[in-house]
Image (cartoon, grey):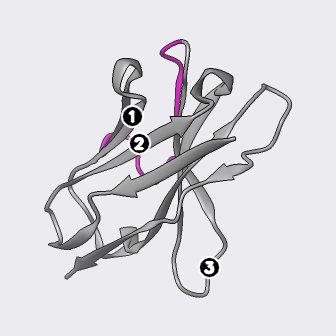
């Protein structure tokens, strides 16, 4: 199993920036892809951005393209989400998660970190 710990959330004004971190430990060698997801109150969880652990392939939801950047430091077993030009609709609990193969689901999840964007 892989243990994931998110950090970096907080309260920020609209237009501001935050950087989230996801630190992985345990059997990190099994990681295939790491993703950031978010869930706002009363809404379904949605994928925000994902990145290949062994390469540089990235994916972004349309709602965050051009504003968010996912990156990683393999030596530190850490994935980051740089969030710029934040909007009130970005308010949510942000989770990182891992999938082990191209065919598997994201089945290792962190505890989440709250991001609140005030207008």
The residue where tag 3 is placed is: 43
Q: Is residue 60 something one can see in this rendering?
A: no
Q: How many callouts does the rendering have?
A: 3
Mark 3, other Cα within 10 Å: few <14 / some 14–19 / many ≥20: few
Q: Residue at x 72, y 45 (%)?
A: 106
Which quadrant of the figure contains the C terminus? Answer: bottom left
Distance CA(mark 1)–CA(mark 2): 4 Å
User: Which mark, by number, is residue 23?
Assistant: 2
Q: Using the rendered view, name the quadrant where residue 68 is placed.
A: top left
Q: Which mark is residue 99?
A: none
- Indicate the position of residue 36 as horizontal and vertical percent values: 51, 49
Quadrant position of the N terminus in the picture: top right
Which sits earlier in the primary sequence, circle 1 or circle 3? 3
| Magenta stretch, residue numbers | 55-68
Sequence-wise, the earlier of marks 1 and 2 is 2
Question: Which of the 4 image quarters holds residue 98?
Answer: top right
Q: Which is closer to the viewer, label 1 or label 3?
A: 1
């Amino acid at each position: 199993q892989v243990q994931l710990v998110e950090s970096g959330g907080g309260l920020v004004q609209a237009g501001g920036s935050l950087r989230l971190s996801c630190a992985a430990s345990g059997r990190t060698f099994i990681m295939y892809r790491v993703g950031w997801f978010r869930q706002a109150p009363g809404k379904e969880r949605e994928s925000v951005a994902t990145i290949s652990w062994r390469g540089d392939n990235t994916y972004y939801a349309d709602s965050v393209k051009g504003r968010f950047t996912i990156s990683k430091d393999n030596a530190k077993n850490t994935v980051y989400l740089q969030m710029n030009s934040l909007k009130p609709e970005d308010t949510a609990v942000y989770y990182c998660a891992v999938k082990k193969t191209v065919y598997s689901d994201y089945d290792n999840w962190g505890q989440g970190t709250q991001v609140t964007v005030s207008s």
